[in-house]
């Protein structure tokens, strides 16, 4: 009977998970439809928007934001947020560019690895503050946003690294294409597929969703919540470091102000992509699509000669709309799960189980029943005079 109950409860959990996954797929499909409408309408108004050069620029610009959105998703699904990613990008971009400019003999892969490690260290600081010291993520990462940017300004000392100071082999990474697709976009795609597979197939990835859904229950389930939160921040920082290298290779000119304010675009891309700001749901694929959508909207508005302030207002409206939609969908999913749990026909585990009923061996045995001499019913045949004793059967 325990196995039946377990199977029933597992079926309910699977049904709820399928419902949430279906909602996530609908969100991602909606983004794909929005992208199709965006490119179709803008291309019809201005055909230059659909040229190879324009599409290539959109892919290059969205690759960096998508990389950051993938890392930010790891943090957001644990019910946290990292506002310091823009400062980490600026710090790693300037650090990598400075090493390449002052030490031309250093191999490019070593510089890239060093920037990734630098970003991971920044992420570890955030992770320790949030996961171990229990500082709210919004407060901790807002503080490190300014701290890391201050370190960047102190390190730069007003210096700017130009494209002419860096090796041509490094700058070619930002301009090289493979089969017509920019190399940086392919790098972002590989990172997206790897992280998406890890979240969907590895236990550590599923535990991040469990932490975001219910941190207290995750602790009771034996999940090492602190370690997972720190790991999420470290991974986010490492990807921000890699994005800093991509930024330096893409634009060539680097100073201490690189990527200032980019954290808002990243959070917007994550939320527009369907990742719940309250944690526990969403995919990196949706976050990457959100980054592509926001980048495409910015490019489309520029092509249509829309004022820059209006572009910012439109992006803000999209962010608010995404948050409202996410909340509405979350409430609908919760209501559907409650209806499924309480209004469906009773499952076997809701009924009295056989072991709760009177079993044959639990029923009254013949020796437990009232014996004839214990009865006091004159109509009973046993209530007769005993011929031998002259007494009635009840002893009278």
Image (cartoon, grey):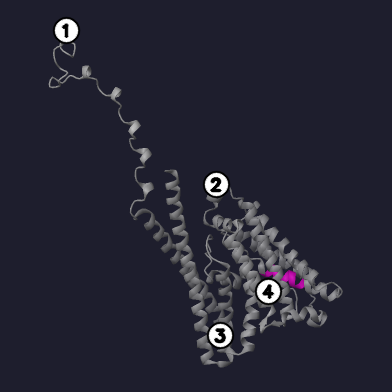
Report the side of 216 relative to 117 (left or right). left
Q: How many marks?
A: 4
Q: Is residue 90 left or right of residue 360?
A: right
Q: Nearer the viewer, residue 226 or 195?
A: 195
Q: Is residue 93 left or right of residue 14?
A: right
Q: Which mark is residue 388?
A: 1
Image point (64%, 88%), residue name: 53
Q: Decide which of 144, 85 is in the foreground and name it.
A: 85
Residue 131's disc number:
none
Q: Mark 3 or 2, which is nearer the eye?
A: 2
Magenta part of the protein: which range? 86-95
The front one of 148 and 202 is: 202
Considering the numbered disc 4 on the image, is that residue within a helix, a strand or a loop?
A: helix
Q: Are the two marked residues, 1 and 4, in contact with CB atoms closer than 8 angstroms?
A: no
Q: Are marks 2 and 4 in contact (CB under 8 Å)?
A: no
Task: Point out the tag, 3 or 1, that comes first from the N-terminus.
Answer: 3
State the image quarter where residue 233 is shown: bottom right
User: Is label 3 or label 1 in front?
Assistant: 1
Disc 1 versus disc 2: distance between alpha carbons? 74 Å
Residue sticking out furthest to the top:
389
Distance in Å between CA atoms under marks 1 and 4:
107 Å
């Amino acid at each position: 009977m325990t196995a039946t109950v377990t199977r029933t409860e597992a079926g309910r959990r699977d049904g709820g998970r399928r419902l949430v996954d279906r909602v996530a797929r609908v969100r991602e499909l909606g983004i794909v439809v929005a992208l199709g409408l965006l490119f179709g309408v803008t291309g019809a108004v201005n055909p230059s928007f659909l040229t190879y050069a324009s599409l290539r620029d959109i892919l290059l610009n969205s690759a960096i934001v998508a990389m950051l959105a993938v890392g930010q998703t790891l943090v957001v699904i644990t019910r946290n947020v990292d506002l310091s990613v823009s400062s980490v990008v600026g710090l790693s971009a300037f650090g990598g560019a400075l090493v390449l400019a002052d030490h031309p003999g250093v191999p490019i892969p070593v510089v890239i690895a060093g920037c990734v490690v630098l970003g991971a260290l920044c992420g570890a600081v955030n992770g320790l503050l949030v996961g171990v010291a229990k500082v709210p993520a919004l407060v901790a990462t807002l503080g490190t946003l300014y701290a890391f940017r201050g370190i960047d300004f102190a390190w730069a000392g007003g210096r700017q690294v130009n494209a002419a100071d860096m090796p041509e082999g490094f700058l070619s990474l930002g301009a090289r294409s493979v089969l017509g697709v920019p190399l940086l976009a392919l790098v972002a795609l590989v990172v997206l597929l790897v992280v998406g597979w890890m979240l969907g197939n590895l236990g550590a990835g599923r535990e991040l969703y469990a932490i975001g859904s219910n941190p207290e229950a995750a602790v009771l389930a034996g999940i090492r919540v602190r370690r997972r939160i720190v790991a999420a921040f470290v991974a986010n920082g490492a990807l921000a470091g890699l994005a800093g290298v991509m930024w330096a290779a893409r634009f060539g000119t680097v100073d201490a102000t690189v990527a200032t304010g980019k954290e808002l675009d990243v959070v917007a891309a994550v939320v527009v992509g369907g990742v719940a700001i309250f944690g526990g749901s969403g995919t990196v694929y949706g976050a990457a699509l959100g980054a592509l959508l926001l980048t495409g909207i910015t490019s489309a508005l520029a092509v249509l000669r829309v004022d820059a302030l209006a572009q910012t207002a439109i992006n803000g409206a999209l962010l608010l709309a995404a948050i409202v939609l996410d909340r509405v969908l979350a409430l609908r999913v919760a209501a559907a799960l409650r209806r499924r749990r309480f209004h469906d026909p009773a499952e076997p585990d809701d009924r009295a189980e056989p072991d709760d009923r009177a079993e044959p061996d639990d029923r009254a045995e013949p020796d437990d029943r009232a014996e004839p001499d214990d009865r006091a019913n004159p109509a009973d045949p046993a209530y007769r005079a005993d011929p031998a004793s002259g007494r009635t059967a009840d002893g009278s």
